[in-house]
Image (cartoon, coloured by chain):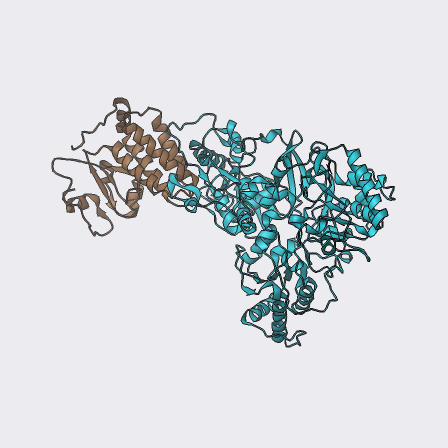
Amino acid sequence: MVEIELDGKKVDIAPGSMIMHAAEKAGTYIPHFCYHKKLSIAANCRMCLVDVEKAPKPMPACATPVTQGMIVRTKSDKAIKAQQSVMEFLLINHPLDCPICDQGGECQLQDLAVGYGAGKSRYEEEKRVVFHKDVGPLISMEEMSRCIHCTRCVRFGQEVAGVMELGMSHRGEHSEIETFVGQSVDSELSGNMIDICPVGALTSKPFRYSARTWELSRRKSVSPHDSTGANLIVQVKNHQVMRVVPLENEAVNECWIADRDRFSYEALNGDQRLTAPMLKQGGEWKTVDWQTALEYVANGLKQIKNDFGASSIGLLASPHSTVEELALAGALVRGLGSDNIDHRLRHADFGNSSGVRWLGTSIESLSTLQRVLVVGSHLRKDHPLFAQRIRQAVRKGAQVNAVNSRVHDWALPVANTLVADSGVWVQALAQVAASVAREKGVASPWNVATSVESDAIARSLLGGERKAVLLGNAAAHHAFAASLLAVAQWIGEQTGASVGYLTEAANTVGAQWVGALPGAQGKNAGQMLAGGLKAVLLLNNEPAFDSAVGVAGLQNAEMVVSFSPFKANMDVADVLLPIAPWTETPGSFVNAEGLLQSFYAVARPLGDTRPAWKVLRVLGNLLALPGFAQETAQDVLAEVLAQRGLGGQTAPLQLPASALNNTTSVAADLSPVQGQPAQASIYQLDGVVRRAPSLQLTADARAAQEALA
Amino acid sequence: MERPGNYEIPLGTPFSKLLELAGGVRKGRTLKAVIPGGSSSPVLPAHIMMECTMDYDSIAKAGSMLGSGALIVMDDTRCMVESLKRLSYFYMHESCGQCTPCREGTGWLFRLVERIHGGQGKVADMAVLDNVAESIMGRTICALGDAAAMPVRAMIKHFRPEFEHYIEHKTSLVKTAA
C-alpha cells in the first residue's frame, strides 16, 4: 500500500491507483466530467486538476498515479483556480438552455457550475453551434452544442458495448461526437450512453420533454426481461412510469442495463394495455367487472372439471412471471387436481428438467473467466449484460469459444467457433469432447471424428484456470437439450469448467424452483400446446409468439383464460383478465445465478388492472381451494420459502446450492434432429418488449420483423 | 530581412551578428521585434533582442525561448495586433480538441484579437486576453496550450500600448507597408 496525504488526511491506497481513487476512498469529492470508474482514463476534461506538492503545474487527479508520501491539495488556491478556469472554458460554448434541457436538474455540468462557475460570463463572442444528428430511435442527439467532449460515450462504445459507434470527428473547436457518416447507434446497450453523458447532449428520445427530473419519484425494481435480474430505478410521475435507469449493483448489473430493460416501459403506457376484464360472448368482446369475469372463470373451470376431468385443465405460465404468481397459479391448478403445469413454452426436450437449471457460476465471476465455451446462443443479443461481462474478461485475456449454427457478431473477439447446423449440435459438442479426450489422453465416451475447430476449442478449454461452459437459449430449447447438457457436463468435468445455462428469462430459474413444471401425471407445455386441453390458463404469455409451436392447439379448448397486462391472445382466449405488469405489483424474480430479488409495485395498477397474485388468490377462494389465504405478496413468498426449508429468510437471497442442479443422467443421443430450436430475438422476447414502440424501431427489431415477414 | 534563409551559426553568436549575416532589416526600416524560437516562443522587442546571444541561456534570461531556432524578425512596419491575430488563428486551427482549455481557449483568444483588430475592441479585453492565456497555460495535456498562450502574453507584456491604441482609435498605430 502507498500512503499519501490528501488535504491533510492520510490515505492508504494500492500502488498504481490514481489520486482520484484515493480521493474516493477518503470521501473527498474532486470535480470531474470525463472520469468514469468503469471506463478507461482520458484526462481530457481537465476539471479534476489538483495541486500536487513539488509539481509545478496542477495535475489531473484521474490520471496521476499515487506515489509514497505524495502531498495533494484538492482545495488549495492553485487547484481551485485551475478548476474554475476549466469550468469557464467549458461554459463559454455551452448553451445556457438549462430551463429547456432534459438533463436540467441531473446535469453534472450544471451542478459543478454552481460551485466552480462565475456568475457572469466574460465571453462575448459568438457561441459554437453543432449540428444535430439522428442516430436512431433511442438516443436523441438534437442538441450537440451542449457536448463538452468528455468522450465518455466513445469510450463506453469501445470498451463496454464492444462497438465504437460514436467517435469524435474533426478537431479543435470543430470536433464533434458523431457516428460514421450518418449511421445509427444500434448497440443493445446504447441507452447507457445517456446515463454517462454528463450533460444534455445525449438524452433519451422516448423520455424527451415528458417530465423534469425533480418531479419523478425514484423507486427500486428488477428487470422482468432477461435472466440478469438487472436492478432498476423506475421513475414515476402521477402513477405513470416515465423512465427507467439502472440501479447500481456491482454483483449483478454493475451500473449498466440493456436497452430492453430501459425502454420497455413504453409498453406500459401504450394503448395495448388491457384495463378491464373482458369476456367473449357470441364472438364479441365485452368489458365486464371483475366479479363477473372471475365467476365466469371459476364456473367454467368447475364445469370443465366435471365434464372432462381435472386433467383437461392446464396452465401455461411465463418465465417472466413472478415467483409469487407462479406459486399461486401452480397451487390453483394442482388444487383443481391437475398436474398440467409448465412454463417451458419454447422448449422441445421436456426430459431435461431433473434439476433447477441455472448459470452454474455467479454472474460476477463471468467478468473474470479465462476460458469460455458458449453453446447455442446469440450471446450478445440474448444476454447483453452477460456478454458485457465476458467482454471485460476478454479484455483481460480470456478466450471465448463457440458452438453455434453460424458465426455471430458478439462485439468481442471469439477465439474459435465450431459452426454446425443446430440439428447436429450434439455431435459437434461431442467432437469437442473427443478432442478434449485426446488432448488429455483419456477415453472419449463418444466415438466421433474431431476437427480443426474442435481441437482448437479443446486446447483452449484445457488452458487457463477459471472456465465456464455456457448453454444458451437455443441449446436449452433444442430437441436434444438433455444430450447437449450431458456432453457439456463431461467437458466440464474433464476441463474443470463450470457448466450452466444462461437461462432465457427473468424468472426461468424461479419458475423451475417454484415448480411451474408438470407433475408426475401432467402434460408438458409441448403436449398442452398440441391440443387436448379443455381449459387453458395462459399466465402472462402469448403462445403465438412465446412458444415453439404456436397457438393452433388451443383453438379447440372450451375455455382459454388470458392473464395479461395487454390485449393479448384475443384470437384464442374467451376471457381476458388484466393483470399488473412488474411495475404495478410486488413480486420476486430469481435470476440466472439463483439470486432471488424482490421488488415492490412502483405505480398504481392501470384502470381495473389487478396484481396477478391477488387475482389468483380470489380465484382460489371462489373455487374453495385450500391455501389461498395470503394477505400480501410477501406472505406468498414467505410460504414458498418455508416450503423449501428457507423459512424466515428475506430477499435478496441466494438460493442454496442444493436447490440448483445442472446434472443429468440422460445418455447423449448423437443422432441428428430436424428443425430449429425456438429462439426469441432480442426485442421479441416477451409481451412487454414486443409492445415497446421505440424498441421496435431499432435495427435489431426491424431485422427480426423482416425475418418474420 | 534582406536575405531570409537558413543560417548555421555557433551557439552564443550575438543576435546582432546573425542579423548582419542576413543582411539586416530591409532598407529604410528599423528592427521592431523578434520571435526567437518559432511562433510559440514569446516575442522580444528589439532593444532586448539586440542584447542577446543566440543560445538557450541568454534567450531564456530575456524571457523567451530559443525553441526551434526559427526566428521571425519584424520591422517597424509590422502591426503587432495583426501579427498576434495571425498567430492565434494558427493555434486555434492546430488545436486537436482533446482537452478543454486549449479547445475552448484558443478560439476565445483568436476571437478577442480578431475583434480588436476589427475595431470592436474594448479596454477590458486586454485583461481578459491576458487572463485567458494564463488560464490555458500549464493545464493542458500537451504543450500546444502553452504554445498558444505564450505569444499572447508576451505581446501584451511588450506591446500593450499598440493594442490600447488599436482599441481606442480602431486602427493600427503602425503604418503597414501597403
Q: Is residue B145 left or right of residue A571?
A: left
The one nearer the camera, A23 or A247, is A247
* Residue A629 in sight in this render: no
Place of residue A311 in the rendered image (x, y in percent of width and height, measured from the top left): 82, 52
The one nearer the camera, B22 or A208, is A208
Residue extending farthest left:
B27
Residue at position x 29%, y 40% from top? B62
Residue A208 found in image quarter: top right
Residue A123 found in image quarter: top left
The one nearer the camera, A126 or A194, is A194
Whether A240 is drawn above or below A398: the answer is above
Whether A203 is drawn above or below A670: the answer is above
Place of residue A186 in the rendered image (x, y in percent of width and height, measured from the top left): 51, 47
Residue extending farthest top:
B168
Residue extending farthest front:
A282
Residue at position x 48%, y 30% from top? A117
Place of residue B128 in the rendered image (x, y in percent of width and height, measured from the top left): 37, 29
Whether A245 is drawn above or below A402: the answer is above
Q: Is residue A557 left or right of residue A106?
A: right
* Residue A202 in sight in this render: yes
Q: Is residue A431 left or right of residue A60?
A: right
| Display colour for chain B | brown
Place of residue B148 in the rendered image (x, y in percent of width and height, measured from the top left): 34, 39
Q: Which chain is cyan?
A: A
Residue at position x 50%, y 44% from top? A153
